[in-house]
Image (cartoon, coloured by chain):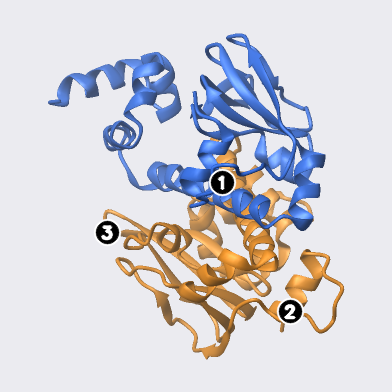
Chain colours: A orange, B blue
Amino acid sequence: LVTLEEFIRQHLNKVENNSVLPFPIRNASLSANKTITDYGQVEDCVYFLNKGLIQVSVLKNDEEKILDFFVSGDFFCAYSSFLTQTPSDVRINTLVVCQVSVIRRIDLMQAYSTSLLANQLGLFVTQQLYLKRTQREKDFLTKSAEERYKDLMNRNPSLIQQIPLAKVAHYLGMHPESLSRIRKSIIF
Amino acid sequence: LVTLEEFIRQHLNKVENNSVLPFPIRNASLSANKTITDYGQVEDCVYFLNKGLIQVSVLKNDEEKILDFFVSGDFFCAYSSFLTQTPSDVRINTLVVCQVSVIRRIDLMQAYSTSLLANQLGLFVTQQLYLKRTQREKDFLTKSAEERYKDLMNRNPSLIQQIPLAKVAHYLGMHPESLSRIRKSIIF
């Protein structure tokens, strides 16, 4: 279980042990396969995943595609909807029982207007989300399915262990059969 | 010509006319078709484009693909390289004569450690970059070439006017002939 305070100490080089968060949070436990933010909903919270596994999907015609996964210690939300306050084109749901810390948008905006720490945290998290999305876009443009799988294994081995093979294949944009073939051809 | 001070007043709701930047900048004029950051280079600056047009490319095998464009009033740099301090896998070059304000990474990092304004600016710019990249990724997953072109026209008509058709096609991931066909089929 990862706390938000630990995340701040670890990533923002804040050494104070008694650091007070610059915004209120609410802790919650969510059941497996629960939709947190649905298609068409306007996102008004940010979530910190203390423990669990989150899936982000997008609809193409009537087919659902997996856009992203989040693991313990990650921030997540329908961030484009959160930023633009327009209906979300992604769906966010739990894959297992999850523990989350919830930050309301109104409280975060308030903190951003005055708190150095809130802005440093928002900047760091947004930079990490940017890196993740950019990497994925470049991978689709420049790498083969096998290369994308090997990269994911190197970058996030725990994710591959936690998620069913069919979902990993889906996320990488390949057929489960192709991924099975690639996995067999890789010498571990 | 857009200044960095104007950008801050416009986007960060800072009303003071005598706002002082939280970091030093250097203004420069760059010739057309000049490489600012090359493949393999570690990015150590952020640029604000006062005036001009910038192209970002990536290599797939030996073929160059266009990843992004930036127009007047945009921040740009090889941001993944800047954040991770690893060699850039993108090339950034001017398409026309450009006026830029240059911020050194070391100066920005210093400002981030103490300045609320620097963090608010970095957060806003990173959020905008995130939205742009996410939109492009979702578009490739969920939209046809024609829909991607129409969206680009709606979102950034000035970009389409400034950039040769072949480059726009390249950016949208289609053949120039296909784009010509689509343009003819659209009633303006």
Pointer 3: what residue? A62
Foreground: disc 2 or disc 3: 2
Residue A49 found in image quarter: bottom right
Q: In the rendered view, would you say A39 is above or below B99?
A: below
**Mark identifier at residue B161:** none
Residue at x 32%, y 62% (from the top left corner): A87
Residue at x 72%, y 25% (from the top left corner): B39
Residue at x 66%, y 39% (from the top left corner): B79
Residue at x 44%, y 57% (from the top left corner): A80
Secondary structure, mark 1, is helix
Name the quarter where the C terminus of chain A is drawn.
Answer: bottom right
Q: In the rendered view, would you say A141 is above or below A116?
A: above
On the question of residue B143 being in view, the answer is: yes
Amino acid type at mark 2 = Glu
Comparing B9 with A169, the one in front is B9
The crowd level at tag 1 (other Cα within 10 Å; few <14, some 14-19, many 20+) is some
Secondary structure, mark 3, is loop
Pointer 2: what residue? A5
Foreground: disc 1 or disc 3: 1
**Mark identifier at residue B125:** 1
Q: Are marks 2 and 3 on the same chain?
A: yes
Disc 2, disc 1: CB below 8 Å? no
Name the subunit of mark 3.
Answer: A
Amino acid type at mark 1 = Val
The crowd level at tag 2 (other Cα within 10 Å; few <14, some 14-19, many 20+) is some
On the question of residue A181 being in view, the answer is: no
- Work out how far the residue at label 2 is from the one at label 3, CA to CA, in angstroms: 40 Å
